[in-house]
Amino acid sequence: MHFTFYLLVTLLGVGTTASATCFTTAGPASFKACCPTPQSSGKGTISGVVFKYTCGQFFNGGESTISASSVKECAEECQKTPHCNSASWSAKQKCSLLGEKYPAPMKLGSWLTLQKTTEEPDPEQDCKELVDAAKREAESKCTTEKDRLQREGETQCRTEKDTALTNANTQCQKDKDTALTNANAQCQRDKDAALANANSQCAAEKDKLRAEADTDAQRAQSQCTTEKDQLRQQADAARTQCQSEKDTALTNSSSQCTTEKDQLRQQADAARTQCQSEKDTALTNSNSQCTTEKDQLRQQLADAARQRDTERDGLQKQLKDAQDKAGASGGGFTDSASAQDSACINNSWNSLCSGSCGHDTFTVGGVEFKRKCNVSTGGGREEQWLHRSSVMDCVRECAGIKACLGVGWIALQGVNGHCHAHMTVSGSLRTAPSRGNPLHEHHLIYVPARAIPFEALQSSI
């Protein structure tokens, strides 16, 4: 259950495209996970937004630098900051946030850059990589546990076998020594007694025997030899008994060791079978849960897209109806003379802030706008409007949207009819000076009645 919850959180929060560990590795180690080589790059998902990361680069001119322990934390800070479109992060846990959209990077080996993209996240790929990572982790853990059990079993068996063999050898040697000592002692006593008796008998009978025939002397000698042979046979029997007892002890020790080894092998086989069963069950449950969650996410994305298209079509129809109504009634708004001055409206992407336009205030569609050149703007929710014929075309569209606080543009982007609409978030705008190549400068034309930029507010006090 914990694994399923972790997988769900990961799918809804952070996903990876190029590396399964780049956005999931904690601390400074995430730099090596993202950048195994200086030229590495990839993508990851934070709260539904796809970020592209590139190693060995740094964005100059960051608006703020904060502490972030990992790549994921830096990307989350950029995602939470409304005007942040890109950031730079280093393994020293520094995160530089930028409001500009994709500025030119500098080469710097200890940094990587993060850029927001408009791509849709791929939850299926994210889930597959996380399942593969969980599978590898489970297999590694199982292998480690099997190796540990095998080592413990082998060590225990070897120890018990050595102990049993040592005890058997020690006991056998003791029994041998005892039997041999006893046999030698008994043999010596018997020999001494026999010799004493023989000598005594011999001494007593010598005088008598001298008189007897040689045959009787030989009989006495034969008797002595027989007794000695009997003593030798008794010693041999004692040695044979000792060897038999030693062999029996060794046989019993070996049989006991074999039985214990078989039991350990059976326990290890049972543990491996249990581990494989639990691993297969976990993987089956994980795959089933992952498939269900992916289907739910796809359905949610499809519903959101349909709702967005419906709302957009409705707003466009309302705008067209309002414009048609104003044109049909002849009672529409008349633009101010400044908004019709050719020095301002011709090639307005350049002329409005190049010095040729002598006006700062313009009335378009009944709404008063003020111009503010050479400033970058933040504080609002920024929308990208493309394929507009002029800045005044963007201004006229902004005038009809009450949530629009103003329009920003860069001269170089005029070739694509590209302007930036700043929508209401907090009801205020914040500007900062922008100086450099005229074609790359940021400019603003805003509605004072809706929001006054912070610098404009300061200058009016």
Image (spheres, helix red, strand yellow):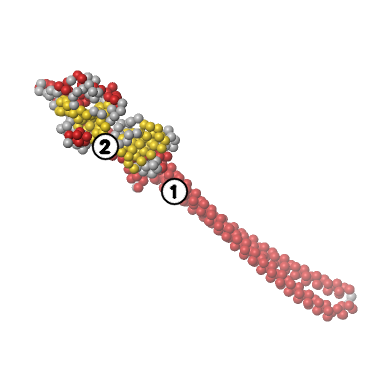
Specify which label sits upstream in the sequence, 1 or 2: 2
> What amino acid does circle 2 point to?
Pro
Q: Amino acid at mark 1?
A: Cys
State the separation of the CA atoms marked 1 and 2.
49 Å
Q: Residue at x 34, y 34 (%)?
A: 60
State the residue at coordinates (86%, 74%).
Answer: 217
Could you tell me residue 428's position as x and y percent?
20, 36
Image quarter of the C terminus: top left
Question: SS class of the residue under badge 1?
Answer: helix
Q: Residue 380, position in %: x, y? A: 23, 35
Residue 275 is tagged as 1
Q: Residue at x 28, y 39 (%)?
A: 80
Nearer to me, 369 or 264: 369
Q: Quadrant of residue 394?
A: top left
Q: Is residue 279 left or right of residue 259?
A: left
Front position in the image: 431 or 121: 431
* Position in image of residue 304 (x %, y %): 25, 34
Residue 352 visible somewhere in the drawing: yes
Residue 50 vs residue 339, the one in the foreground: 339
Q: Which mark is residue 82?
A: 2
